[in-house]
């Protein structure tokens, strides 16, 4: 996963090109909602553990599939939120900077969208 860099190629700091940095490391588009994202991912993790329990308890197939669908939707929703934050933060930052970086960020986002659509 690529991020945005405030200056330079990243070689001097060991960060990926395009990474905004601060004293503790990289700042990504999701940084301001990190706690909310972690809470959401823990809920999704609970759903997956619930699926394991359903299989372990020999629950009816359709009931398990219903829960698989709910878990899938939760992950898709999380992915869309993360994509929106990437567009607002990383792509917008590249647009402000100008140059060819915006083209790379748009291509990167387009490929991420394509991967999401394949799932």
Image (cartoon, rainbow, N blue to C red):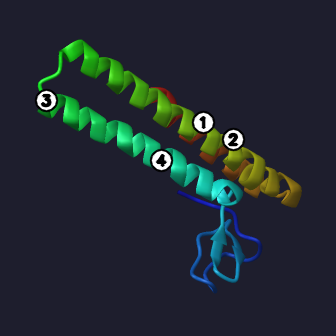
Q: Residue at x 62, y 84 (%)?
A: 13
Q: Which residue is mark 3?
A: 57
Task: Name the front one of labels 2 and 4.
Answer: 4
Circle 4/circle 1 CB separation < 8 Å: no
Q: Secondary structure at mark 2?
A: helix
Measure the alpha-carbon separation of dots 2 and 1. Answer: 6 Å
Task: Name the front one of labels 4 and 1.
Answer: 4
Q: Residue at x 68, y 65 (%)?
A: 18
Q: Which residue is mark 4?
A: 41
Q: Badge 3 local density, few (<14 within 10 Å), some, or many (20+)?
A: few
Circle 2/circle 1 CB separation < 8 Å: yes
Q: Which mark is residue 15?
A: none
Q: Which residue is mark 2?
A: 84
Q: Secondary structure at mark 3?
A: loop
In the image, residue 38 sits, relative to residue 87, either above or below, namely: below
Q: Is 26 positioned to the left or the right of 61 in the image?
A: right
Q: Which residue is mark 1?
A: 80
Circle 1/circle 3 CB separation < 8 Å: no
């Amino acid at each position: 996963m690529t991020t945005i860099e405030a200056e330079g190629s990243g070689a001097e700091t060991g960060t990926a090109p395009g990474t905004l940095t601060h004293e503790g490391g990289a700042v990504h588009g999701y940084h301001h909602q990190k706690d909310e994202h972690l809470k959401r991912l823990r809920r999704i993790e609970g759903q997956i553990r619930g699926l394991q329990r359903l299989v372990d308890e020999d629950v009816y197939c359709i009931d398990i599939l219903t829960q698989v669908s709910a878990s899938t939707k939760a992950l898709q929703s999380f992915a869309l939120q993360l994509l929106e934050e990437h567009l607002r933060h990383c792509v917008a930052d590249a647009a402000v900077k100008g140059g060819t970086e915006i083209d790379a960020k748009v291509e990167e986002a387009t490929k991420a969208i394509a991967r999401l659509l394949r799932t």
